Amino acid sequence: MQITDSAHGEVTVLQCEGRLTMTTARPFREAIEARITGGTTRLVLDLSATEFIDSSGLGALIAGLKRARQAGGDLRIAGAGTQVLTVLNLTNLDRVLRPHDSVEEACDGW
Amino acid sequence: MSLRRLALVRLLVVLTLGTGLWYVGWRWMFSINWANWWIALPLVLAETYALTDGFLFGITMWRARRRPDPPAPAADATVDVLITTYNEPVEMVARTAAEAQRIRHPHTTWILDDGNRPEMQAAAEDLGVGYLRRSDDWSDRPRHAKAGNLNNTLFETDGEFLLVLDADQVPDPLILERTLGYFQDPEVALVQTPQWFTNVTDSDPLGSQAPLFYGPIQQGKDGWNAAFFCGSNAVLRREALMQLGIVGYVRSVREAVDDSLRASRRVIARARRRAADHGPVAVRALDDVAAAVPVAQRRLRSGEPLADITYDFRQVVHQGSRSIVEHDLEQIRSDLQELEGLSGEGTPPVSLDEELGLPVVDDDAMDRLAARDFSPLGALQSVTTLLRAVDVDRDEEAQPMMPLATISVTEDMATAMRLHGLGWRSVYHHEVLAHGLAPEDLRTMLQQRLRWAQGTMQVFLRENPLVQRGLSAGQRLMYLATMWSYLSGFAALVFIAAPVLYLCFGVLPVNAYGWEFVQRFVPYIVINQLLFLVVGYGVRTWRGHQYSLALFPLWIRACWTAAANVFLGRPLGFVVTPKTRQATEPGFPWRLVLPQLVASVLLVVACVIGVVRLWTGAADSITGTLVNIGWVAYDLVVISVIFEAARYRAPEPDKESVD
């Protein structure tokens, strides 16, 4: 999993490229937590280049959301492909996290 | 079991149920002695309970088959071997860990130390196995015992499969090679193997071995795709557990947000009455929050994502807090200006902006002052606590996801049922692949049984299998069967009381203990016993039968403590079963077996009185007296196991098995 940061106004966009699975979930979660601890609390995860996600990957998203909220910020997801959307739907996680179509839409209203 | 034996078992199941219905149906319709309804009704209910138990057992046995050998495991399957410990001796855990390292399939071994012991960590390092303890998130939050220990670990390790072992369960090197193959079926989430104990004598007075459960019963449940997870000696699929964690997270967040919004109207209204003391700004802030509640509720009902709803709601709360902070600072500012005017010289206590002469509070500091921990709404304690729950972070728990169920002290059964509810499959692999240690004294054994019973009843009351979504009819019945069996204490009480009342006072619960009674009852009971004989052929099942009645005080206690826990929130008191020999109390443990002792004395006295009454002509039915004396004899034989257990002293272990 390759993470690339870019600033988008006051929001930091993390481009997540590759597979977010049980083997990558922990380093991924730690990478997000490091950013939040470092003061970047408004995060949008751009999942357009995320090929595959499993339940452990979703777990990392939830962990990131928790940390962001506790730091007074937020974590949003954008650009998810079919596989990611399907998994979000199957686990009902889309009832908590709104999968935004695009990064721009996710940054809206911040 | 072989096909021929299965056919015989099915025949006996049908016959048992047929004769059982013939008997119990007659009991309900023609033989209840309503004059003594206070014992007649409990007795017929107890008999109906027993018949239902037999029915559930029959359904279980209907599909009790031994599985064919599993396919070979995928060579690249990654496995974490997890050894859970709390207070077991370091040497015992280290020995299990050392054996775990010898397991043949590639894997990583971890010791999960809930006891936080430096010497355990040192032992793990010596062996070269992983060592894990709870993360800081768990301090000051519910720890959830073993389920919590495993849940913590799930986020620290990354194996595709997890072999869970209790500290005393020494694994066979083949345990993974023999079980991983089942996971070639992508729907399989769990493979459970038997628990077998090495420190148990042949006669096993404590009833530690459970050959009927780790045999025909689990095989039968497996036939209905309902083999249970039993906490140890099992392999689990990480993906399935994680999925459970996410589905559970979504459900808990939704419930928490819904509940706290619902409760907030009342709490805010109460705070609003007191807010006048804090000034009009506080009143306005509370009004804004109060107005945001119905909006959030409406959005919740329309199915909008919870993160959005709670984020917007938090913004309103934040704005409210901020306006109060601003107001307070304004106050300070004017006070300071006044102060400065008074003193005229010296350094002002707060740095002032040079041009404007205002205190320097930057935007960031303002945000932090208004953040939830410092919120002035905190003065209104109840509001803050409540509003905090309107979020998606599950702040009340150490981690937002709890893949292993935490609704019960027996997390294993609850977790298995949720897995089945999501459509995952489970497997019971009937081959002993780990050897453990059973309790060696009555007190420890009773603690363990009490915990199992309490945990099972918690699941029964909190997530009743009959109403859970996603379970098949067979799975519902399999879970119900186990839960139902824990209600036996109440029936046992009646089965002890009824003959005593008849023999001592001639109180008849049935219209007559005549020929018709015998004619209907005897075939039922004989065929029922025959069924157990055939099912349990070659294994010792008698101990289990004895304990299901003899532990009646414990089963009853488990039922009411679990109910008090679920409905009134009373603590159960989680007891970790000691895996080591406890200091044996000198003499006979009278207190532990007092209820059974009283029952036995009553039964014996009742027999004597019954015979005397027949002799003197006070009782007129020879059949009635004989039936009841036979009944008492059966009760006594069954109960006697507890006295044998109380007298039991475990043999000294061989040197070899310890070293």
Image (cartoon, coloured by chain):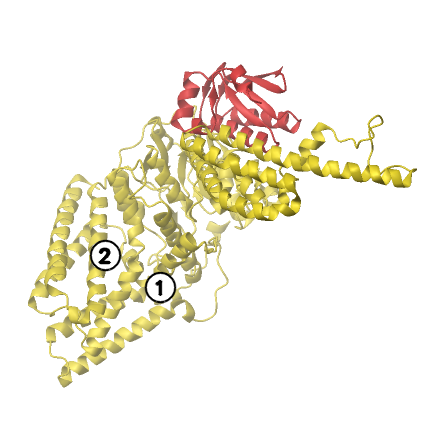
In the image shown, does B327 or B381 lie closer to the viewer?
Answer: B327
Mark nearest the camera among 1 and 2 is 2
Q: Mark 2: give few (<14), some (14-19) or many (20+) Cα within 10 Å.
A: some
- Looking at the rendering, which quadrant does residue B524 occupy? bottom left
Q: Where is residue B340 in the image (x, y as percent from the top left)?
A: 87, 38
Res B553 label: 1
Outermost residue on the right side: it is: B345
Residue at horizontal 21 percent and vertical 40 percent from the top = B63
Q: In which quarter of the image is residue B223?
A: top left
Please identify which colour was used for chain A in the image. Answer: red
Q: Could you tell me how far apart the alpha carbons at marks 1 and 2 are, in whole angstroms?
A: 17 Å
Q: Which residue lies furthest to the bottom in this view?
A: B616
- Secondary structure at numbered mark 1: helix
Q: Where is residue B363 in the image (x, y as percent from the top left)?
A: 71, 28
Would you place residue B8 above or below residue B642 in this image? Answer: above
Residue B576: x and y in percent read 48, 52
- Label 1 sits on what residue type? Pro
Q: How crowded is mark 1: few (under 14 residues within 10 Å), some or many (20 or more)?
A: some
- The amino acid type of the residue labelled 2 equals Tyr
Chain for mark 1? B
- Residue at 47% over, 55% down: B571
Residue where numbered disc 2 is placed: B49
User: Height in image: B415 above or below A62?
Assistant: below
Both labels 1 and 2 in a single chain: yes
Tag 2's secondary structure? Answer: helix
Q: Mark 2 lies on which chain?
A: B
Residue B66 makes an appearance in the image: no
Chain shown in yellow: B
Residue drawn at point x = 23 percent, y = 50 percent: B536
* Left or right of residue B74: residue B600: left
